[in-house]
Image (tube, rainbow, N blue to C red):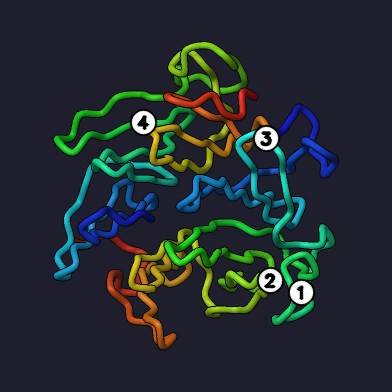
Amino acid sequence: MGGWTAGNASGQLNSPADVALDSFGTLYLSDRNNDRVLTLAADGTATVVVGTGVPGFNGDGLPGMSTQLQSPGPLFVAPSGTLYFDDNGNEQVVRKVSQGGVVSTVTLVAASGVTADASGNLFISDPVNHQVVRMGLQGFGIVIAGTARRDFRG
Amino acid sequence: MALDAAGNLYVADSGNQRTQVLSTSGTVATLAANGRDIALDPTGNLYLTAGAQILEVAPAGAVSPRTGDGSYLFRGNGGQATSARLNAPVAVAVSTDDALYIADQGNLRVRVRSTLKARFPH
């Protein structure tokens, strides 16, 4: 998937930023400069799952295909099937797509990495505050590593 | 970041050129492995994007290149993965059948190091 020329035509990408697999082996890809998230099937077929292709923010509660993104970065598919991604250009929020396909904002921090466990805990590495945060099912974040200083210790 | 089967959280602490491992009990261990993005397979091998290569770090610590010959630019679809060239690989994911999927940003494409299945040959 991809080619020699950056673009958004069939078979083209523009600055692919992260890849993740779901439990069925479907590949998810943040196509950053096309402001969209794609899935790639085993035969190479690409399908847009989030993003209109026009950068911006038009709110939560819409289906993925109707939701505007801006420079999506790190992404992860939880064991539950929920897709989490960093909507980097939109004030660096982490958003999710539920299995029903609706987009919502999870938390207002930047993420350089995102992952989740089978219990539904979400882990976010926050490069601005130099921390790793764990968010439980109730949506509260707990700092589990880092001192909020850019530094080396331990 | 990546979680292993036991719930340990691996964090690419690239600003400090290391990987931090946070255990479920809260202790922190440090690996010398330094990558911008990391992924774990079910047996505990760690994969990381390092320069123009994907490196594998075995649980015992042995490091071996798995994709890329270390030089940038593009080479090698259909050939040996360690003779291929990547151009700014920024992210890696590993499938349950041991294929590596690489966001090869500088080459504007997703590369695949396949093992059991031939997928995305480009």
Give the letter of the chain under mark 4.
B
Amino acid at the residue labelled 2: Asn
Badge 1 element: loop
Give the letter of the chain under mark 2.
A
Q: Marks 1 and 4: in contact by CB < 8 Å? A: no
What residue sits right under mark 1 in the picture? A57
Task: Give the Cα separation between the discs numbered 2 and 1.
Answer: 7 Å
Q: Which mark is residue A44?
A: 3
Task: Give the Cα separation between the discs numbered 3 and 4.
Answer: 25 Å
Q: Which mark is residue B55?
A: 4
Q: Earlier in the sequence, mark 3 or mark 2?
A: 3
Quadrant showing the N terminus of chain B? bottom left
Residue A18 at x, y percent in the picture: 56, 48
Q: Marks 1 and 2: in contact by CB < 8 Å? A: yes
Q: Which mark is residue A90?
A: 2
Check if mark 4 and mark 2 are on a common chain.
no
Badge 3 element: loop
